Amino acid sequence: MSEPVMFVDEGLGNTSYLVDLGGGRALAVDPFRHPGRYLAEAERRGLHIAYAVETHLHADFVSGAGELGSLGAAVLAPVASGRRDGVRGLEDEEEVDLGGLTLRALATPGHTPEHLAYLLSDGRRPVALFSGGSLLVDAVARTDLIAPEQTEDLARALWRSIQERILPLPDDLPVYPTHGPGSFCSAPAGGQRTTTVGRERRANPLLAAPDEDTFVKELLGGLGTYPPYFLRLRPVNRGGPRLYGPAEPVLPRIAPRHVALLQAGGARVVDVRPARQFAAGHVPGSLSIALRPQFASWLGWLVPGDAPVAIVAGDDQDRADLVRQARNIGYETILGELDGGIEAWRAQGRPVEAIAVTPVERFEGRVVDVRQRHEYEAGHVPGAVSVELGSVGAGRLPSGPVGVMCAHGERAMTAASVLAGAGRRDVTVLTGGPGDWSRHHGSLDHGP
């Protein structure tokens, strides 16, 4: 078997795979929603995608297995997932003959109750393990996505899954996880996306735990927050998401007066321009989420999944990427973009607001750090108040003028736009991060 082709979603921190099965056929593992990249790569290699395999019901992205299934692939998934869109459900230890290669399902509950890992063998030996959300690089996937009362039981199940089903496999067996660096599904992990069984046996800090109780304590103690959209995508994937086909998505144009009417009717206006452009002038009440690989994560954290959304974009931004990212986490109501951008809005005499920006090293005043908890604890400006970006709208910020900071400025601008939408006018966005501050003012504080 040749090395699988990796498809990485840097923003969501996930990896999917395309495997050449021989004979002009390919297998896709945990594919993302838009099928275009898989089809293009398969065509480039002279392959057709014969199988699409799911390791579990994903909470962090909408599965693309159904899209590939509609184009002729046989879709395989855990029978316990209860998928209702024509998939073949697999039981523990069930094997599928792929023609020269065999795929064996391994029940590995923990990250989710129905989770399967897939062992690919060539008739003589195993050649690859697709571990989904069980064994990751330097980590394992979180177990708190189902229900609070199940979290510890699932953590214990994950310990047994790894110890009994995965670690007995050969040390040199390549492991291809779905979740990786940047994924909210996992504890913080390193920069590698693939590994081997032996490497994880030796180096994975959670597997160094001497017993199940210690493993559970360390795993649950390292979990951070996650976007609320995670709570609605498992049912979406179970029922079978809407199919769009392989065509590149487009973003319709909406006249300024219609954007104003939509906003007045409850639609969200999301401005995806770079943070400084938003700061210089934006539609009042709009939310700043700069278009970058992390766009979908923050859209899913801050905008309700059923809210209609109108976009404000810059001239050179990739509209298709924006829509793909939104659909990948289940946003079906991206209505279109403001025709002519903010300039057309201004030209009609409509109001525009601005937000103050200053470099972090020049700011004197109270600092609010909106990074994730583990980032804050790794090093922060002395005296900075920690309020994660996902919580800034919950009234947890101190009163009075504040400077909002993150690592570079994008999340800080998002936080400031949330606060401006709630009526606060005493917020300054700090560009740069703790490292920039420390180079001018001294050492950072660490810990909670």
Image (tube, helix red, strand yellow):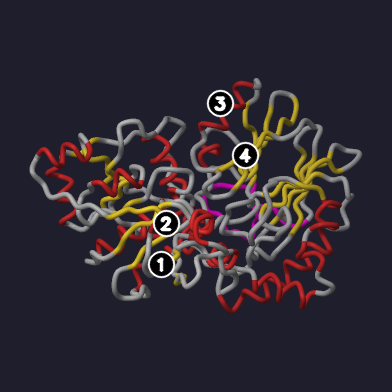
Q: How many marks?
A: 4
- The residue range painted magenta reads 76-92
Q: Is residue 88 magenta?
A: yes
Badge 1 crowding class, 10 Å Cα cut-off, few under 14, some 14 to 19, many 20 or more, is: many
Q: Earlier in the sequence, mark 1 or mark 4?
A: 4
| Dot 2 and dot 1 residues touching (CB under 8 Å) | yes
Placement of 414 over or under 343, stated as above or below: below
- Label 4 secondary element: strand
Which comes sooner in the sequence, label 2 or label 1? Answer: 2
Task: Name the residue tied to disc 2.
Answer: 360
Q: Tell me the element at label 1.
A: strand
Give the residue number, with chain letter if any, for mark 3. Answer: 40
Q: Is residue 283 above or below residue 301?
A: above
The structure residue drawn at horizontal position 8% and vertical position 43%, both measured from the top left corner, is: 349
Q: Position of residue 380 (x, y in %)?
A: 53, 65
Q: Do residues under tags 1 and 4 come within 8 Å of each other at their CB atoms?
A: no
